[in-house]
Structure formats: structure tokens, C-alpha cells
Image (cartoon, rainbow, N blue to C red):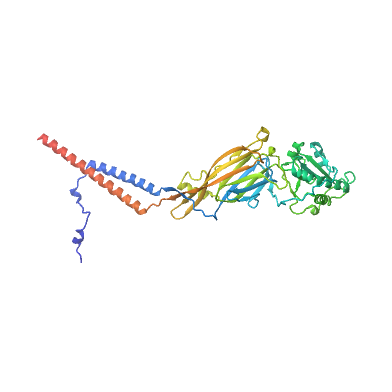
Amino acid sequence: MVSTSKIKSVDFYRKIPRDLTEASLSGAGLSIVAALSMMFLFGMELNNYLTVSTTTSVVVDKSSDAEFLRIDFNMSFPALSCEFASVDVSDVLGTNRLNITKTVRKHSIDKNLRPTGSEFHSGATATELKHDAEDDEEYGEGSVSLNGHSFDRVTHHYPILVVNFFAPWCYWSTRLKPSWEKAANIIRERYDRESDGRILVAKVDCTEEVDLCRRNHIQGYPSIRIFRKGSDVRDDHGHHDHESYYGDRDTDSLVKMMEDLVAPIKLDSQMISSDNSSTKLETGLKRPAPVTGGCRIEGFVRVKKVPGNLVISARSAAHSFDASQMNMSHVISSFSFGKTITPKVMSDIKILLPHLGRSHDRLNGNSYVTNPRDSTENVTIEHFLQVVKTEVMTRSYKLVEEYEYTAHSSLVHSLHIPVAKFHYEPSPMQVLIAENPKSFSHFLTNVCAIIGGVFTVAGILDSILHNTMRMVKKVELGKNF
């Protein structure tokens, strides 16, 4: 058995009997200062241990070719009709996607950006509409020309009013004119205006009746509108609910469309029958026209991570547009790249890096307004966006992948149809933000160093102070003797 005395011999902290120690006022003061210093330094070390620190580095973006970049947007165009609004995407690799509808929604809005109805469905439109063959056959003027005054009168008089809003300079209006007049003559012979009076075929020249066409939100030529007496002609605010015809434009197709409209209307009452199932044309030929001239476009598209363009424009394969009257003013509610970041994740990011996330929605809330009447016609609004990918890594997992961008906008006079263009350029580099791991053992070591260091320094100071005071006393005693 090892004796107790042998164990005591290895004691590093041998005690001095209390009777052999001497307390001093200077030692008490140094002890208080040492204790306060230990508490202060311990608090500083604890705060440093609990504070998250990060390192930022720039590396090459290692995204594969299979990865696509998502672009989310919500924009309002007060002067662009949903009827012709098109979202197009192109890039430097030759990708060219026109009129994307699968992931894009459109809502008609008024000039104050307020929605005026449910979602606008543009439907599928034929890529090439059928017209009559171009020949020299003579035809009479069968349709009635309307102006602002006569238009309001006939919309309340005839159960069915079919109007061709056209422009003489328009190629498609010229192609439609022969078949439209032939169809109007046939309808007039079969349904006399005086004895029958159930339908009237008319036309409006939008170069002369500018206000009338603007009131009916005509932006593409020719536009064939169908007005119904009573059921969808409203007197309030001067707006008319109507339908647009998108079918073939040859004489036979136009006559068939008009006869299908007349069929459910009784000759004696001239009112639309309650069973209007027979008035439904083939799918895609007739759809509700927008009741206002504006459009809110929202949704997302996926693009390759190469420089490209997102373009909002008026587009149609069978209509013409007056570039001088096109107004691409817009208000951007949101525009961002990458996946949508939830508020919780964003708050976690703020803990790591407070200033992160300030540039992922740089365009949000901005308005870009032009007015063709103020000598700013044919104006294309361009936005140049440089996109940088940022990854935030914690000690155990990737917290978020975010895309931030810079934005510069300009107004450009164009010789073509004005558009709203977003030119984006993804950077080949990415920013990597990583959390620096902190060891708990390192924290404990620092705490021990603080305690031991302060205690040792205080002991040294106390010894120096005590010895100095003793020497001073000896000197004084020596002088006295």
C-alpha cells in the first residue's frame, strides 16, 4: 500500500498556514481589479465564441450544362393588351422561345394597375390563318362604316354586331378586306337589316376613328370584335364586354361564324335565346376580349446560364401593330433570379451576413414610363442585368443559393415595334460565403489562459508593490537611526 505521506509529496499546490500569511490593503485592491478583469475578459471571449464569423471567396461557377436559371417576374403594363402580350426568351446559343404561356399568367388591368377580371387565357392560335386567294374578282362594299357616334347607336340596336377594326396601311387588313366585304354581302342578303335585323356587319377605320379604337382597346390590326345587345353591352363607364374572333379569314369561315352567332336568336323577339350552347364556336376561334387596355404578366421562365434576353412585346402571326402608338411603360413588382427565398431562410442569412440579400430584387418597385403623345414614340425600354451567384455554407450544410444582380436601365428609340427587354449576363464566377468553425476546446483554453494570466500578473504586481513598500520602510527606518 502506498502511504499517504508519499502521495502528499507530489502535491503541486502546497498550502501555507493562514497564520503565516499577511493581508494587505494593496493586495485587496489588486484582487478586486484582477477579479473584474477576469470577468470582463471572459465576457469578451464568450461573445467572440458565440459570434458567427465568415470567410468570403470568389471561385469559378461549376454549374453543369443541365442546370437552368429560373427568372421570376411580376410586371404591369398599363398600355399593353393581354390579347397580344408575349413573353419571349433568347440567348447566345441560339435558343429562341416565343410566346411562353405554360408558366406565365396574364391578368387584364386598368390604367391604375387594378385588376379588371379573372386570368386572361389567350388560348391556342393558328400559326397561319386561311384567307381568300388573291384575285381580281370585284366585290361590293357590304359592311357598314362606323364612327364614334354611330357605333354607340348600333351596339344598342342590333342583337349581334360584328366589327372589323382595321388600318388601311396594314398588310393583314388588306388581305382580310375582300373576304370581309364578300361575307358582309352574303349576310346582308340572308339577314336583311330592315326585315330581319338580327345582325350587322360593320368596319371601323382606326386611322380615322382613333378614339373609338382606343376605347375598345384595339392594338393589333385587323381585330374582329363581336358585340351582343343586352347580354354583354354595358352602359356603365362606357365599356363594352365583347369577344374576339381568331379563326380563319376566308369568306366561307367568316359566313359560318356569323351564321352560328345568329342561329340562337329568334326572329320575332330579336333576343338571344337562353340556351346559347349553339353560339359556341370551335375551340380557339372566339374568346373573350380584354375589357381594359393593360396587362399584368407574372410567372417564371427557365433559361440557360448564358447571356440572353427576356422580352415582353406585342406579338401576333396575323396582326400588324402601329409602332408609333405602342407604349411599353411598365411597373415591376418583382424580378428575381433563382429559387424564391423564404423569409425564414432570409433571416438565417442575415445572421451570417447582414448585408447579403439586398441586391436579389434590385428592380422591385421601379416604374418605367413613356408617353407616345409626348414625342417619345417608338421607345424600347431596356434593362441590363449582371447576375452573380452566391452560395452560403454553414458548418454542416449549404444554407441557400442566391442570385444577386446589378441593374442599369435606358430608353432607346427603335425602328421596330417597341418592346421591354431584359438583357441578363450570368457571371462565370461565383461568391462562396462559408461559416468559420469555432472549437469549444479552444474556447476553454482561452478561458483558462485568461484566469491564469490575470492571476499571475496580479501576483507579480502584488509582489513588486509589496517589496517596494518594504524597501521604502527600511530606508525610512535607516534614516531615523
Q: Is residue 64 above or below residue 220?
A: below
The C terminus: image quadrant: top left
Residue 229 shows in the view: no
Residue at the bottom extreme?
1
Residue at the top extreme?
374
Residue at the right extreme?
195
Residue 381 shows in the view: yes
Figure disc tally: 0
Depth order, front residue of 193/13: 193
Horizontal side, residue 340 vs residue 227: left or right: left
Residue 138: where, in percent of width, then height? 85, 44
Which residue occupies 18% across, 49% down? 19
Horizontal side, residue 126 vs residue 451: left or right: right
Depth order, front residue of 467/104: 104
Depth order, front residue of 476/48: 48
Which residue occupies 76% across, 54% down? 282
Horizontal side, residue 386 vs residue 110: left or right: left
Residue 254: where, in percent of width, then height? 80, 49
Residue 344: where, in percent of width, then height? 51, 50
Which residue occupies 35% across, 54% down? 441
Which residue occupies 25% across, 47% down? 456
Q: Is residue 226 above or below residue 369?
A: below
The N terminus: image quadrant: bottom left
Horizontal side, residue 62 vs residue 36: left or right: right
Depth order, front residue of 460/342: 342
Residue at the left extreme?
481
Image quarter for residue 113?
A: top right
Residue 215: where, in percent of width, then height? 74, 39
